[in-house]
Image (cartoon, helix red, strand yellow):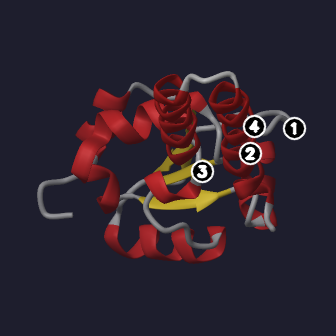
Amino acid sequence: MTRAWILPVLLVLCGSIVATGLIVKGSPGEAVALLLVFVLFAGVNSPLVFPRSIGALEAQRRSAVDGRPVVFWRPGCMYCLRLRIRLGRRARRLHWVDIWRDPAGAAVVRAANDGDETVPTVVVAGRPHVNPDPQWVREQLSPSA
C-alpha cells in the first residue's frame, strides 16, 4: 500500500470501529451517519479526488509543449484540496504530480522551497509558486489549453 492511501484507510477503519461501538450501544442511526462522515472525509483525502498524477519529468515535458502549469501536491494536504476544489473542472487541464508517489517530484518541490516539501507548489513557465491563489492559477490557463 502506498503512503497516499494510509490516511483514507485509517479514517475508514476508525469510523468502522466507532460505528460498531455505537451499534453495540443501540444507536444504529448515529452509527450510519458517523460512518458516512468518515467515509466522505476519507474520500476527500484520497487520491481519487485529484486528476491522475504523472511523473515530474513527464509533467515538465508536457508543460514545455503545451504551456500548462504543473501542480505538485500530496494526499491529505488541505491546501492542495482547496486548490483542486476551487479550480473545478479546470483542474483536469493542469499536470498533477503526487510528490509521495514520485521522488523526482518531491525533489523539485524541495529545490523550490529551501528543502521543505511545501505543497501545493505550482510551476508556471519554469517558475515555482508556493500555495498560490486558485484564481491566479485559473488565470494561468489559456482558453486554448
Vertical comparison of 64 with 32: above or below:
below
Q: Which corner quadrant of the image does residue 45 belong to? A: top right
User: Which residue type carries mark 4?
Assistant: Ile
**Tag nearer the camera, 4 or 3:** 4
Residue 125 visible, this angle = no
Q: Which corner quadrant of the image does residue 107 belong to? A: bottom right
Report whether 3 appears left or right of 48: right
Q: CA distance from mark 4 to mark 2?
A: 6 Å
In the structure shown, which secondary structural element does the residue marked by tag 3 occupy?
Answer: strand
**Tag nearer the camera, 3 or 1:** 3
* N-term-proximal mark, 4 vs 3: 4
Vertical comparison of 110 with 86: above or below:
below
Query: How many C-alpha atoms fall within 10 Å of the one at disc 3: few (<14), some, or many (≥20)?
Result: many
For the N terminus, give its image quadrant: bottom right
Residue closest to the far left: 143
* N-term-proximal mark, 2 vs 1: 2
* N-term-proximal mark, 4 vs 1: 4
Q: CA distance from mark 3 to mark 1?
A: 15 Å
Which residue in the structure is indicated by mark 3? Answer: 72
Q: CA distance from mark 4 to mark 1?
A: 38 Å
In the structure shown, which secondary structural element does the residue marked by tag 1 occupy?
Answer: loop
User: Which residue type carries mark 1?
Assistant: Gly
The residue depicted at 57 percent of the width and 77 percent of the height is 58
For the C terminus, give its image quadrant: bottom left
Which residue in the structure is indicated by mark 1? Answer: 115
Which residue in the structure is indicated by mark 4? Answer: 17
Residue 63: x and y in percent read 44, 67
